Amino acid sequence: MSSYLLRGVRPLGGAVTDVLLADGSIAAIGSDAAAASAAPGDTAVTVLDLPGQVLLPGLVDLHTHLREPGREDAETVRSGSAAAALGGFTAVHAMANTDPVADTAGVVEQVFRLGQEAGYVDVHPVGAVTVGLGGQQLAELGAMADSAARVRVFSDDGKCVDDALLMRRALEYVKAFDGVIAQHAQEPRLTAGAQMNEGAVSAVLGLRGWPAAAEEAIIARDILLADHVGSRLHVCHVSTAGSVDLIRRAKERGIDVTAEATPHHLLLTDELARSYDPVYKVNPPLRTERDVMALREGVADGTVDIVATDHAPHTSEDKDCEWDVAAFGMLGLPTALSVVVMTLVEPGLLDWVGVADRLSSAPAAIGRVPDQGRPLAVGEPANLTVLDPDAQWTVDPWQFPGPARNSPYREMRLPGRVTTTFLRGTPTVLGGALQW
Ligand SMILES: [Zn+2]
């Protein structure tokens, strides 16, 4: 295996140094790294000059839709993995709402193996909570946990586990193997036919609104259930100020709840729906400026533990149509880190240590992924990404891998560019380009 000397990088945004990668691990940091690479040895060392660039642990996404099996016309495990590597990720969790649904050991093992074959990132399948996402009967959670895919995160994402008794049973069941239920918090009766956030803009546009209370009611209930049975709850894509408040109070009471915010909910608001451009149609919907600011504050103070993409590729047939029939969802993997830089780092809400926590070590911990999100230290696995913080780029979804183009950031100028990604010492991205 080749060795690489990363010259002039700033680990977690700190002082400039050199980092040597060998045999899949971090072999040396500092003057030792340069010396070791200069010493004659049997393996050639490739020198990468990355002056002043920020070295982070490889990013870990707890919430990705890879669409395979079933909707390979929108995304495949391979194309989604490539998009992830370009975005600086070294691991993603692939949601279960595929066709067939990932509700058995067979399907999660298939997705896991497709991820290994692609080789860009570690693909960790999320198991469905209920059979066929039907909300009627618990899926084979134990069999998925025991499978080769070692599933630890379970979610009916796209749908809410709205039956309180089923949710309670799921929370109880996953305790046996240290799993977590990731809830898509959406009270179905309050959101039937909803198209966007319920508020001033929906009233003007005449689109059916989606009240904040529909999200908050489920989060409040699930916090009480998780506390009652002593299990781990993770709340997907928190989108309202009230949700942040509920989670903050639950944490103050010592309840084991974690939460995520998406990049798009940290930047975009429901004002964009005035364009009637369905690229802004997403579930949960874009909310108000006040919600955006509360989410940023929540991520900054750790109430919201992680940023997760909810990368949701769609074909143009499903997305480029009238607002009310268009599919919900946005691309997120290639742009996630740049949007975090724009919304949290540049305003001074989060430093690079915080970025490494919210996008790498904390999601790895929630997903129980042991060899990701590790410290930047000698002997640790070389799952790494390098970002040029001074670079700017204009988003062009036609340059993304995969067939989907539904990026809400198209033609936007974003700060910070991933130049380099390593998975266990093998470069997946160099000079901003995929390696195979
Ligand atoms: Zn969801």
Image (cartoon, grey):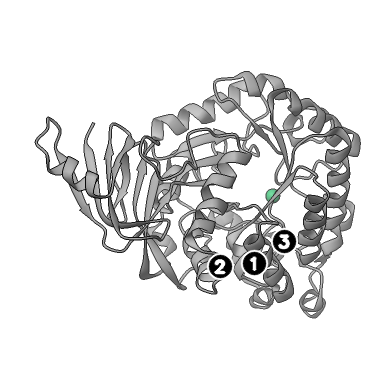
x 82%, y 36%: residue: 135
Of callouts 2 and 1, the N-terminal one: 1
As drawn, the label of residue 344 is: 2
In the figure, is residue 88 to the left or right of 319?
left
Residue 362 vs 206, above or below: the answer is above
Q: Position of residue 134 (x, y in %)?
A: 79, 35
CA gap between label 2 and label 1 equals 7 Å
Of callouts 1 and 3, the N-terminal one: 3
The residue type indicated by label 3 comes to Ser
In the figure, is residue 286 to the left or right of 375?
right
Asked whether residue 70 appears in the rendered view, the answer is yes
CA gap between label 1 and label 3 equals 11 Å
> Which residue corresponds to mark 3?
239
Residues at marks 2 and 3 touching, judged by CB atoms closer than 8 Å = no
Q: Position of residue 331 (x, y in %)?
A: 54, 56
Q: State the SS at label 1.
A: helix
Residue 295 vs 313, above or below: the answer is below
Q: Position of residue 184 (x, y in %)?
A: 74, 47
**Cβ of disc 1 within 8 Å of ligand 1?**
no
Q: Position of residue 74 (x, y in %)?
A: 52, 47
Please name whichever residue, 206 or 58, is drawn nearer the observer in this view of the structure: 58
Please name whichever residue, 366 or 160, is drawn nearer the observer in this view of the structure: 366
Residues at marks 2 and 1 touching, judged by CB atoms closer than 8 Å = yes
Please name whichever residue, 234 or 14, is drawn nearer the observer in this view of the structure: 14
Asked whether residue 322 appears in the rendered view, the answer is no
> Which quadrant of the view contains residue 354?
bottom right
Of callouts 2 and 3, the N-terminal one: 3
